[in-house]
Image (tube, rainbow, N blue to C red):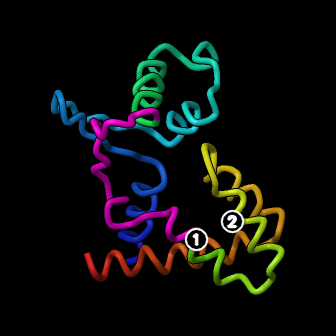
C-alpha cells in the first residue's frame, strides 16, 4: 500500500495530462515545464526537446476558451483546494493570512511551498497532503 501511495503521489506531483478538445491531442507535461510556463522563463534556458512542451504549457495556462481539459488524477485530487484546507487548519492567524496570499495567481504552488518552509510547517503540510492521497486511494 505504501508503494502505491508513493507512486500516486509522484504522478500527482510530477505529471500533468491534458486533452485538446479541438484536436483530441493528449498532452503530458512535467511539473518543471508547467513551472517554466507559469514563471515566464525564457525558452532558451531549456533544451530543445523541452521547449515544445513549455510552449504547450503556456497555451494551456492561457486557455480561456476551455479547449484544454485536465485529465489526470488531479481531477479527483485538487491540490489547490487541499492547500486552502491546510491553510484554514493553521492556528496562527498571521500565517493563515500570509499563506492564503501566496496561493493567488500564477506561481502559487511554488510560493506556497517556499512559505511553508519559511514558517516551518512543511512537514505538517506533506503529512496533511499524504492523508488526502490516502483518501483518494481508498475512495478511488
First along the sequence among labels 2 and 1: 1
Per the image, the residue denoted by label 1 is: 84
Is 109 displayed left or right of 26 in the figure? right
Which residue is at 39% across, 66% downward? 77
Mark 2 is surrounded, within 10 Å at the Cα level, by few (under 14), some (14 to 19) or many (20 or more) other residues, namely: some
What residue does disc 2 label? 100
Q: Name the residue: 50% across, 68% down.
A: 81
Task: Tell me: 22 left or right of 14.
Answer: left
In the rendered structure, find residue 53 and report the number of the disc placed on it.
Answer: none
Q: Nearer the viewer, residue 123 or 26?
A: 26
Q: Position of residue 93 (x, y in %)?
A: 80, 80
Tell me which segment is drawn in magenta: 62-84
- Would you say residue 78 sits in the magenta stretch? yes
Residue 1, by quadrant, is bottom left
Q: Secondary structure at mark 2?
A: helix
The question of residue 61 being in magenta is answered with: no
User: Which residue is farthest bottom?
Assistant: 91
Discs 2, 1 touching: Cβ within 8 Å: yes
> Looking at the image, which residue is at 58% across and 20% down?
46
Q: Is 112 placed above or below 63 here? A: below
Amino acid at each position: 500500500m505504501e508503494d502505491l501511495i508513493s507512486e500516486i503521489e509522484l504522478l500527482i506531483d510530477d505529471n500533468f495530462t491534458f486533452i485538446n478538445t479541438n484536436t483530441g491531442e493528449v498532452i503530458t507535461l512535467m511539473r518543471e515545464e508547467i513551472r517554466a510556463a507559469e514563471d515566464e522563463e525564457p525558452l532558451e534556458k531549456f533544451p530543445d526537446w523541452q521547449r515544445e512542451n513549455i510552449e504547450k504549457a503556456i497555451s494551456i495556462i492561457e486557455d480561456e476558451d476551455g479547449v484544454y481539459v485536465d485529465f489526470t488524477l488531479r481531477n479527483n485530487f485538487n491540490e489547490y483546494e487541499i492547500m486552502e484546507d491546510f491553510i484554514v487548519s493553521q492556528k496562527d492567524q498571521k500565517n493563515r493570512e500570509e499563506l492564503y496570499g501566496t496561493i493567488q495567481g500564477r506561481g502559487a504552488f511554488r510560493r506556497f511551498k517556499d512559505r511553508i518552509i519559511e514558517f516551518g510547517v512543511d512537514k505538517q503540510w506533506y503529512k496533511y497532503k499524504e492523508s488526502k492521497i490516502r483518501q483518494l486511494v481508498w475512495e478511488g
